[in-house]
Image (tube, grey):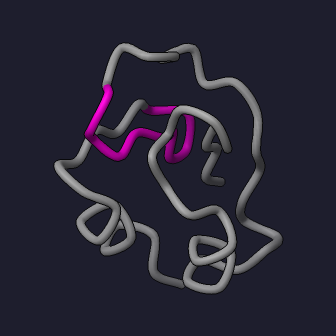
Amino acid sequence: MIRVCPYCSNIDVNKLKEIAGEENVKTGCIGACRAFSKEAVGKIDGELVIKQNEEDFFKLCKK
């Protein structure tokens, strides 16, 4: 399960749903608001993941 914030994760949620499958993506607060201004941030299986950009984050989220 992947959880990202549509406001502060710096990730295109629609692209993420295409890559990981819509059933595997949830949106909402991840508790990292504004702590990372440029990095792609989200939780994968409950663990906070921080990558330099969304492409690197997407590599971890492939179906």
- All told, the count of numbered labels is 0
Camera-side residue of 30 and 46: 30
Q: Quadrant of residue 60?
A: bottom left
Q: Which residues are magenta?
A: 37-47
**Image coords of residue 44 (percent x, y):** 50, 47
- The answer to whether 31 is drawn above or below residue 54 in the figure is above
What residue is shown at x 32% (from left), y 28% (from top)?
A: 37
What residue is shown at x 76% (from left), y 33% (from top)?
A: 28
Horizontal side of residue 47 vs 36, given as left or right? right
Q: Quadrant of residue 6?
A: top right
- The answer to whether 48 is drawn above or below residue 52 in the figure is above
State the residue lying farthest toward the right: 23
Horizontal side of residue 55 vs 19, given as left or right? left
Is residue 59 inside the magenta stretch? no
**Image coords of residue 13 (percent x, y):** 64, 62
**Image coords of residue 52 (percent x, y):** 17, 49
State the residue lying farthest toward the left: 52
- The answer to whether 58 is drawn above or below residue 18 in the figure is above
Horizontal side of residue 39 vs 19, given as left or right? left
Camera-side residue of 36 and 42: 36
What residue is shown at x 57% (from left), y 14% (from top)?
A: 31
**Image coords of residue 35 (percent x, y):** 36, 14
* Quadrant location of the C terminus in the rendered image: bottom right
What residue is shown at x 23% (from left), y 48% (from top)?
A: 51
* Quadrant location of the N terminus in the rendered image: bottom right
Camera-side residue of 7 and 30: 7
Is residue 39 inside the magenta stretch? yes
